[in-house]
Every structure is written in C-alpha cells, then in structure tokens.
Image (cartoon, rainbow, N blue to C red):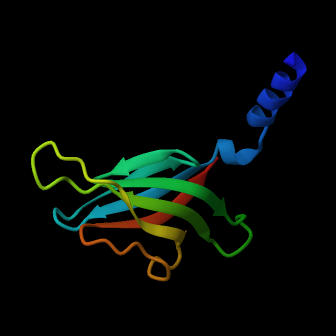
Amino acid sequence: MRALWAAVAALFLFAGPAAAETAVLRGLDKVTGHARDFTAPVGRAVRFGTLEIIARSCSKRPAEETPEVTIYVQVFDHPPGRTKGEQTPRTEVFAGWLFASSPGISALEHPVYDVWAIDCRA
C-alpha cells in the first residue's frame, strides 16, 4: 500500500511542465480605465475584479518561430448581490483560447472587464 501512495505522489510531483507554468494576463476595468498585468498559475484560480480566471493551458512558440502566446482560460463571474450580504452564484462567462497576437479573435465579452493574453512563464 505504501508503494502505491509513493507512486501516486511521484506522479503528481513529476507530472510535467504544466505544474510550473504561469500565464501572464492583462486585465482592463472599463469603468475606471485601469489596466494591470497579473499572473495565473496554470490550474489555479485568480481573481480580477468580480472575475475568477483559471488558466488551463499556456503555450509559447520558440524564439526562432513567429511569436505567439496562446492561453486556454475559463472565466467565471461572481456578480455582487442585489442586497447587502447576498451572494449570487458564479456563472461561466467565457471558456476558450486567448491569442496574444490577435486579441480580438477569441475575446472575453464582459460589460466591465477585458482580459488579454500577454506571456507564458515557466
């Protein structure tokens, strides 16, 4: 039994580069006009305003090829409740690929926020 747990632990520890990858995203609050860059470790949720963003994959072409960064994200909105203290359920507002070279191809459509792919880091 101990050997089984050791094998499972080794699988998670050495699962590959995705565990160490980090997506770099840029978020824009269209109400205030403020933009900021933030990092999203692949597989972990981060918050930007009322959005919860989970980067599922992040890839970057080698330097000798045409530059391109692609990030697959799931975006959920946690809008504030109508009354004080009320919590509304999260809703998925976007799931798809973001392309750094063409931000308009597959873009998050949200009335308050825009999110773009910037970079991938190991």
- Total numbered badges shown on the rendered structure: 0
Q: Position of residue 42 (x, y in %)?
A: 58, 49
Residue 73 left/right relative to 104: right
- Residue occupying image coordinates x 72% and y 73%: 65
Q: Position of residue 37 (x, y in %)?
A: 39, 54
Q: Position of residue 102 (x, y in %)?
A: 50, 79
Closest to the observer, 62 or 120: 120
Q: Which quadrant of the view contains residue 104?
A: bottom left
**Above-or-below relation of 47 to 103:** above
Closest to the observer, 6 or 101: 6
- Residue occupying image coordinates x 77% and y 28%: 9
- Taking the view exactly as shown, the residue that stands out farthest to the left is 83
**Above-or-below relation of 103 to 60:** below
- Taking the view exactly as shown, the residue that stands out farthest to the bottom is 105
Residue 10 left/right relative to 24: right
Q: Which quadrant of the view contains residue 1?
A: top right
Residue 9 left/right relative to 87: right
Closest to the observer, 74 or 5: 5
- Residue occupying image coordinates x 32% and y 54%: 89
**Above-or-below relation of 34 to 66:** above
- Residue occupying image coordinates x 44% and y 69%: 94
Residue 12 left/right relative to 94: right
